[in-house]
Image: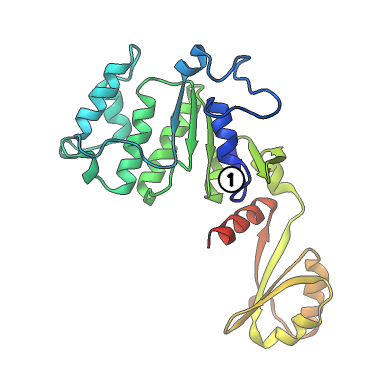
Amino acid sequence: MALIGPNGAGKTTLMSCLLGDRKATKGQVLLDGLAPQAQSNKEKMAVLPQENAIPTDLKVKELLRFFQAIYKDRLKDVEIDSLLCFSPEQKNQLAGKLSGGQKRLLAFVICLIGKPKLLFLDEPTAGMDTSTRQRFWEIVHELKEKGVTIFYTSHYIEEVEHTAERILVLHQGRLLRDTTPFAMRSEEQEKEVTLPIAFAAVVESLAEINEISYKQDTVSFKTRAIEQVWASLQEAGCRISDLEVQNKTLLNSLFDKTREEES
């Protein structure tokens, strides 16, 4: 399950309530019919916070042994090695010497040592390079196959579209949508059209468009009436090869809004 929304939407607050770290001011938060703080819930959940919280002055292998010692039912060395894919040299070095992506992967695998049934992941792939991110989602897929429930936030639209089975959309503390990637993609789409700057005057005369923007060589706009707009552009001498068209779904709009607020 993916939790998305612009900054200030309430994603972190909701996750804190689900973890039992914050008390809801109204209503009730239950996991399997019990409060998040219930011992049976605490025993089956693990959380990966947005910021890595692992000691940097211990060797990787020392960290792994420490967390293995905490749990009775824990991953074996061979299982951890298959998840991390670290070389003997990497396991023997200080955690603080790892790359940002390797630290993130290590923190994630540490979460899995106790074999949790419910995972909370806050921006889990932040700081990961492409190969590490790919390995991360391979592990997530394996966990899903084993029946592990995964609740995560993400700023990467491709992750949400291709990995989530369910999407919760938050805005200003309210739940806007409880949907699926397929359902969101099937909704009415807005088109973003980019043309050579030579067609700027034609674009400005169109009635069915909005959000016109200019760059040095191009003019762009958005429309929900692409057929009518295309007919007008053809009359002005525009060729299909002159156009660049992108679909803009609600999911795209939400992620665009998030990026704008962060810039």
**Vertical placement of residue 106 versus 257, above or below:** above
User: Callout 1 environment at 10 Å: few (<14), some (14 to 19), or many (20+)?
Assistant: some
Q: Nearer the viewer, residue 233 or 31?
A: 31
Q: Nearer the viewer, residue 249 or 48?
A: 48
From the image, which quarter does the N terminus lie in?
top right
Q: Is residue 96 left or right of residue 14?
A: left
Q: Is residue 130 left or right of residue 22?
A: left
Q: What residue lies at 33% left-to-right and 17% top-to-bottom? A: 74
**Vertical placement of residue 203 versus 101, above or below:** below
Q: Quadrant of residue 108?
A: top left
Q: Position of residue 17 (x, y in %)?
A: 58, 29
Q: Nearer the viewer, residue 230 or 204?
A: 204
Q: Position of residue 31 (x, y in %)?
A: 59, 19
Q: Is residue 5 left or right of residue 100?
A: right
Q: Amino acid at mark 1?
A: Glu
**Vertical placement of residue 225 versus 51, above or below:** below
Q: What residue lies at 77% left-to-right and 80% top-to-bottom? A: 234
Q: Position of residue 243 (x, y in %)?
A: 66, 74
Q: Is residue 148 left or right of residue 28?
A: left
Res. 132 in view: yes
Q: Position of residue 136 (x, y in %)?
A: 40, 39
Q: Quadrant of residue 245?
A: bottom right
Residue position marked by numbered label 1 in the rendering: 161
Tag 1, which secondary structure?
Answer: helix
Q: What residue lies at 70% left-to-right and 85% top-to-bottom? A: 199
Res. 164 in view: no
